[in-house]
Every structure is written in structure tokens, then in C-alpha cells.
Amino acid sequence: ANQYESAFRAQRMQNRCETKCSKRPGARVGHTSFIADSKGHLLPGVKRGRVLPDYKGTWDLPARIPVHPINPTARSMEGLRR
């Protein structure tokens, strides 16, 4: 029954070092402004952004996607011919 115990036993524990504690937490920089009300609606004057700005659908892509050029320095001559 103990045949698998040694495979999962940790040889060295990496979490034994003490954390560095500071006297006080650091202050946050800047300020927070609300962009929505309590119902979740945007406040007037807040710029509306697109939901998925970088999304390209199937019809927006080119008919053929060009292949990525092969780096010949990392390949053998036989590998380049394939």
C-alpha cells in the first residue's frame, strides 16, 4: 500500500523562507471615479467603449492567411526541404 508514497514525497520544501513584512501598507496612487450608478447604468458623460475592440470575425479575415517565414538557422537542411 505504501509503494506510491515515495513518488509524491517532497524532497525540499521551497516555502520555508520568511516573508518580508513592511511596517505599514503602501499608499495607493491616484483616485477612483465611478462610471456607473447603483443599477449598473453608465453615468452621463462617460465614454462608451466597444465590447470586443480587437475581435475579428471569420468574414473580416483574409481568404488565405500567409504562412509565417521559417528561421533557417534553427533547422537542418533536411528539415528545410520538408
Image: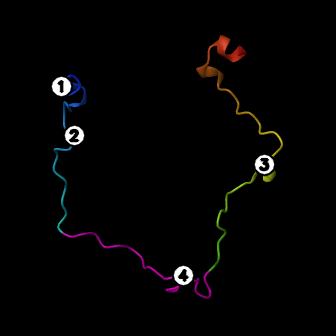
Disc nearer the start of the sequence (3/4): 4
* Quadrant in which the N terminus is drawn: top left
Q: Position of residue 51 (x, y in %)?
A: 64, 67
Asked whether 58 falls inside the magenta stretch, the response is no
In the rendering, which numbered label is found on residue 61? 3
Mark 4 lies on residue: 40
Q: Is residue 2 left or right of residue 36?
A: left
Where is 75 relative to 20, above or below? above
Q: CA distance from mark 2 to mark 1?
A: 25 Å
Magenta span main SS? loop
Secondary structure under tag 2 reads loop
- What amino acid does circle 3 point to? Leu
**Comes first in the chain, label 1 or label 4:** 1
Q: CA distance from mark 3 to mark 2?
A: 47 Å
Q: Which residue is mark 1?
A: 2
Task: Give 71 or 79, whichever is nearer the viewer.
Answer: 79
User: Which of labels 2 and 1 is toward the front?
Assistant: 1
